[in-house]
Image (tube, rainbow, N blue to C red):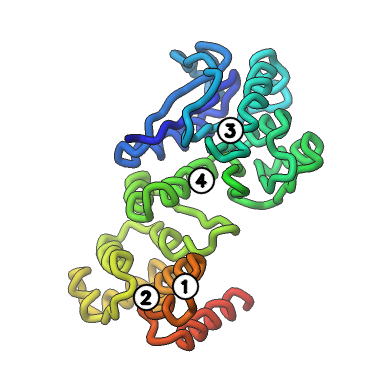
Amino acid sequence: MPQSVYFLVLPGVMALDLTGPAETLQLAGGHFALHYIGPQPQVRCSTGMTLADIAPLPEHLPDNSLLVVPGVFDSRVWFDTGAAATARVWLRQQHYAIHSQRITLVCICSGTLLSAQAGLLDGVACTTHHDVLPRLKAAAPAAIVKDNRVFVEDRGIWTSAGITAGIDLALHLINRLCGSRQALTVAREMVVWFRRSGDDPQLSPWLRYRNHLHPAIHRAQDAMIAHPEHDWSLTALAERAHVSERHLTRLFRQHLGISVREYHEQLRLVIARQRQQQGEAAEKAALAAGFSSARQLRRARQRWDDQLTR
């Protein structure tokens, strides 16, 4: 059964804050059912379009729903309206459902500010568009505001920098809720760059290196992602990619900036990290990820840590 997603639509809504995440989730193979709610049945958005057929604000949302709060193109103006005041009151009424994680709050751009004004972000790590950060800090002194972040998650509450960052966050949610393959499919369909969250560096190799359009590299990556624990040889991957070994090596360097081995190793590090986060010992996690031992796993981690600190 598709997971319900409710977009809180206000007058002055930033078009891409709304349509970016909505289109991304809509492309996720029927995993999500989208709904649009708000205090007014129709509104004018940032690009001058009129959005209609907006359903009234329900008293409660179904458990396991996503509540998406897009931003507006001028929060000083559009959050100082009767519709915004009504939305803040309604958001306060969802406080228990959000903080008990019965529903998931997803704020895009200045939507974070509206949620803060509704008292939802006290003690919560969050972010917003860089122009809105000072007002967010003033509106929610008890919030833990993160500067210069694409998106942040804290106890089931998601906030993002807005505009294109809403697409990044939607892709990340698809990855979390539907799996990396579905997220990769959507990202490729949309021809977008999936940016890494600072809180989730383990997602980087799965999606960070997919911002290219070369089919041979995609074929090799698909094979390694399907079975990262396999001892993939360059010969086997070149056969999957339908190119020569030399050409595949050159393509990875040219388009990804890393070698085939380095890409594969990063995938294995993700698997090992996830296994250890689930409570497995280092040796067992290492073997499950395709490393020969915990020692080899530690060496691989050290290599990448050393590169990040250079």
Q: Which residue is mark 2?
A: 288
**Which residue position holds label 4?**
169
Callout 3–callout 2 Cβ contact below 8 Å: no
> What's under tag 3, amino acid-wise?
Ala
- The residue that mark 1 highlights is 280
- Which of the marked residues, 4 or 3, is nearer the chain's N terminus? 3
- Residue drawn at (54%, 25%) of the image: 8
Q: Nearer the viewer, mark 3 or mark 2?
A: 3
Residue designated by label 3: 97
Give the mark nearer the N terminus: 3 vs 1: 3
| Whether label 2 touches label 1, CB < 8 Å | yes
| Numbered disc in front, either 2 or 4 | 2
Query: Which tag, 2 or 1, sits closer to the chain's start?
Result: 1
- Which mark is first along the chain, 2 or 3? 3
> Label 2 amino acid?
Ala
Q: Position of residue 36 (x, y in %)?
A: 47, 22
Identify the residue at image location x=50%, y=30%: 18
50 to 142, vertically: above or below:
above
SS class, disc 3: helix
Q: Is residue 20 visible?
A: no
Residue at image point 48% right, 88% down: 295
User: Which mark is nearer the camera, 2 or 1?
Assistant: 1
Q: Could you say which is closer to the camera, residue 14 or residue 174?
A: 174
Query: Which of the two marks, 4 or 1, is nearer to us in this view?
Result: 1
Q: What is the distance, in whole Å, between disc 3 and disc 1 at their CAs?
A: 33 Å
